[in-house]
Amino acid sequence: MFQKIKSDLSIVFDRDPAARSYIEIITTYPGVHAILFHRLAHLFWRVKLYWVARATSYLSRIITGIEIHPGAVIGRRFFIDHGMGVVIGETAIIGDDCTIYHGVTLGGTSWKQGKRHPTLEDKVVIGAGAKILGPITIGSGAKIGSNAVVVKDIPKNATAVGIPARLVDESTQKTNSFSPYAVGKDEDDPMVQSIQELIKQINSQDEKIKSLEKALITPKNK
């Protein structure tokens, strides 16, 4: 557990260029506070001190604005940037080296018992405001764009954007780049791209129609 806590603190320097010292991280980063609270709450949950675990989680929510159910399983070097409004459900599973931003929800779509929240494999990045819903799996290295709504599995190293989330053309992705909000300039919503193409075609047709009208109206020189 102490090794996890140490790695949770150290990873902030890699993910946030604004971080300057361990003292600053420990005292002013709500995402780090939420993770530390969760490590303790999850320990209580595993030994079946359920009320104590929930009380610890609730205290964390009051202090940080981040709600993580004590039953959620979270791997090493998990980073929550900004954090306000993040919700992580009871049966969520988060792998190593994942990053999520404020307003993200790892939620359920059913009231039935059992696995009902998402699984994030290693090195997943989820942009601000995204909603990942149901017992789905987000593959290792995948990126979810800001405000996307994901209700189906996302394959490894893919990028998904939009509502509902759609996969971005993988040929345009830069595998070695890191986009803070999970979407770069070359990763537009495919629906938006299609609409832009239609608009270009309409504009082109308008120009042709105007040329034809001008040719018909203009009298021929005798």
Image (spheres, grey):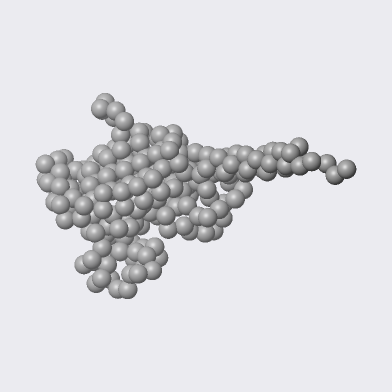
Left or right of 77? Residue 39 is: left
Residue 88 at least partly seen: yes
- Residue 130: where, in percent of width, then height? 37, 45
Residue 49 at least partly seen: no
Please state which of residues 81 and 121 is positioned toward the viewer in this rendering.
Answer: 81
Give the residue drawn at x 52%, y 48%: 188
Above or below, 140 relative to 79: above
Please state which of residues 14 and 213 is positioned toward the viewer in this rendering.
Answer: 213
Which quarter of the figure has residue 52?
top left
- The N terminus is located in which quarter? bottom left
Please state which of residues 43 and 65 is positioned toward the viewer in this rendering.
Answer: 65
- Residue 152: where, in percent of width, then height? 44, 34
Give the residue drawn at x 11%, y 41%: 51
Give the tally of numbered discs.
0
Give the residue drawn at x 52%, y 39%: 191
Q: Which residue is situated farthest in the right direction here?
A: 222
Q: Which residue is situated farthest in the top direction here?
A: 112
Left or right of 190? Residue 12 is: left
- The C terminus is located in which quarter? top right
Left or right of 8? Residue 44 is: left
Please state which of residues 219 and 150 is positioned toward the viewer in this rendering.
Answer: 219
- Residue 62: where, in percent of width, then height? 15, 52
- Residue 213: where, in percent of width, then height? 71, 38
Give the residue drawn at x 52%, y 42%: 192
